[in-house]
Each structure stands twice: as structure tokens, then as C-alpha cells.
Image (cartoon, helix red, strand yellow):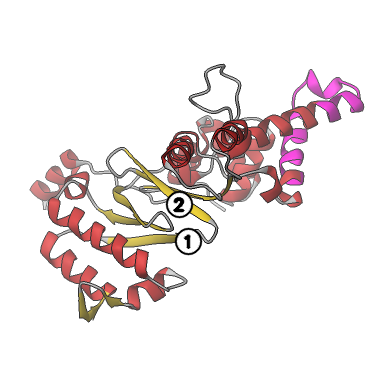
Amino acid sequence: MAITAAMVKELREMTGAGMMDCKKALTETDGDMDAAVEFLRKNGQAKAEKKAGRIAAEGLCKVVVKDDKTAAVVEVNSETDFVAKNEEFQKFVAAVADQALATSAADIDAFLAESWNVDSSKTVKDALVEKVAVIGENLTIRRFAKVEAANGCVVSYTHGGGRIGVIVEAETNVVNDAVKEALTNVAMQVAALYPKYVSEEEISADYVEHEKEILKAQIMNDPKESQKPEKVIEGMIQGRIKKELKEICLLDQVYVKAEDGKQTVGQYIAQVGKENNADLKVVKFVRFETGEGIEKKEEDFAAEVAAQMNA
């Protein structure tokens, strides 16, 4: 398969690896982008971040909460940041969030087919199409999530004026201001440090084994580390995987407001529970960041003007 400059550029943006390394990876994997990412990771030339975390698009995330028991978050995308700041667009996003709070839909297609709460003569999709015509830009209701707490409460946090929206669900027999403040602090943690799981209990054995394979490949591709005894190498892998899991599991992360710089989120939650005589446990979180996984169109106005002049 012919490896194009565009393919090399895309892989470089995904991984942060050098241009020649990206070209070699694509050549070795016959242009398979996912396999090329794996190739670079195994050779220690790429970070583990996914493409979704490196590409941005415009729009807003909106979170709404009802009675501390139910919460919903939506992401609605626009083509430009200018429209994302538009009052008409922001009102529409708020209405979509209210729709999500009341929805029974299981997926985005069912959600778009629902009767629009603002005007029952229309569907959500009809309302979206109308808003596109009014605003003059392509808009997309990309995703939604609804969280209901049966034995506790939910809290929310919004960062960057709608760039990031977070919901945290907790099981607790006490719901007071102190507990809700603590959970809001945890939601801020989720926004800032992007955990993937609440705890290690949620991580599949397959994921752990896959990461161990990556780490072992990195070691074996290092001229110095590969010469170490097998027992030492196994210890290195165990140590590194343990460190990685602590970074991606919310309860194992160091709490961002820890006074001693060591207290974990799990220890912080236990402390707050003890102080309030509460059996407090974080059971779920949802984190939306505007534009995750959406390729943002790069505008070249000089080239556009030149093309129009030559037309």
C-alpha cells in the first residue's frame, strides 16, 4: 500500500512520534493506522494517549441535575467557536440537556427520534434541523448520558464554560452539603486528570495483559534494559503497570487538593464519610469533553482567497 504524506501527518498527530518513525510504522503495517500506533508504542516512540484525546472540535457540553438524584450531560457540536458562544446556540444546548434529563432513549438515534419537549409536534431531529437553518452552521447532537442514583446522589461539574462536563454518582446514606461538596471536588478531579475507571475492579484482565505486552516490547527494544535478567524485567513490568493503573483509576489518583500531596481520592472520600457518619462510595462518573475524537477542520483563509481569485 502506498504511504501518503497525509497518512504520516495523521499518525504523527495521533502519537507525537517523529515523521520518519511514523512513515516506517505505516510501511511495516501496510498502512493500517491502528497497527501503526501499536508498532510505535511497542518501540517506545509513541505515548499511550488515544487519538480522541488529541483532536478538538467546537461546541458545548451541558450538564443538568434534578433533585440530587438524576443528572444528564450532552455534547452538541458546532463548526466554529463563534457559534458556540452564541446565545441562540447556548439556549438550544440547554434545551437538549433538559430533553436528556427526561429521556428514556438508549442511544442517540432513539434520542433524535423522540418527541421534542419544547414542541411535541416535532422530533428532536426536526428541532436540530431547524436550528441549523437559523444559525447557518452545521450542528450535531453528538452524544448524551443520563445517570440516576438509586441509593445516594449525583453531582456535576462544568469546566471551561462548557468545554468539559462531568457527572459523579455516589452511594451514600447521608446527603448533606459537606458530602456534596466533596463529590463536587471529585468531579473536578475527573475533569482535570481524566481517569478511565473508578477503581481497578473495573479493569478487565485482557486490558492489563495487553498493556503488559506493550511494556515488555518497549523493554526488549531498549539495548540496555533488554539485557537484564528475566526476573528483573518481570519486576519492571509489574512496577510500571501498577504505576499506570494508579494514574487511570480515580480512587487511586492523588487527590488534587491533598494537603500532604499524598492522599488519594479514595482516602479523601473515606475521610469525608467518616467525618459525616456516612457510608460513602463513588460508584460511577461520566466525563464529556467537547470535540473528543472529532477531526477539526483546518481553515486556510489565504489559500481559499487565492483559489477564489484564480477561479
Amino acid at pointer 2: Val
Could you tell me which secondary element the residue under label 1 belongs to? Answer: strand
**Residues in magenta?**
209-235
The percent coordinates of residue 47 (x first, y second) are 58, 33
Q: Circle 2 is placed at which residue position? A: 154
Tell me, yes or no, whether the two marked residues, 2 and 1, touch with CB atoms within 8 Å: yes
Q: Circle 1 is placed at which residue position? A: 148
Give left or right: position of 268 versus 74.
Answer: right
The percent coordinates of residue 144 (x first, y second) are 40, 61
Q: Overall secondary structure of the magenta stretch?
A: helix
Is 138 in front, or is 100?
100
In reply to whether residue 138 is colored magenta, the answer given is no
Amino acid at pointer 1: Glu
Neighbour tally class for label 2: few under 14, some 14-19, many 20 plus, Cα within 10 Å: many
Pick out the residue farthest to the front: 277
Q: Which mark is residue 291?
A: none
Give left or right: position of 208 versus 138.
Answer: right
Residue at (17%, 65%) from the top-left corner?
131
Give left or right: position of 223 versus 244.
Answer: right
Give left or right: position of 60 versus 224.
Answer: left
Could you tell me which secondary element the residue under label 2 belongs to? Answer: strand
Is 158 in front, or is 41?
158
156 lies above or below 45: below
Tell which circle, 2 or 1, labels the residue nearer the N-terminal end.
Answer: 1
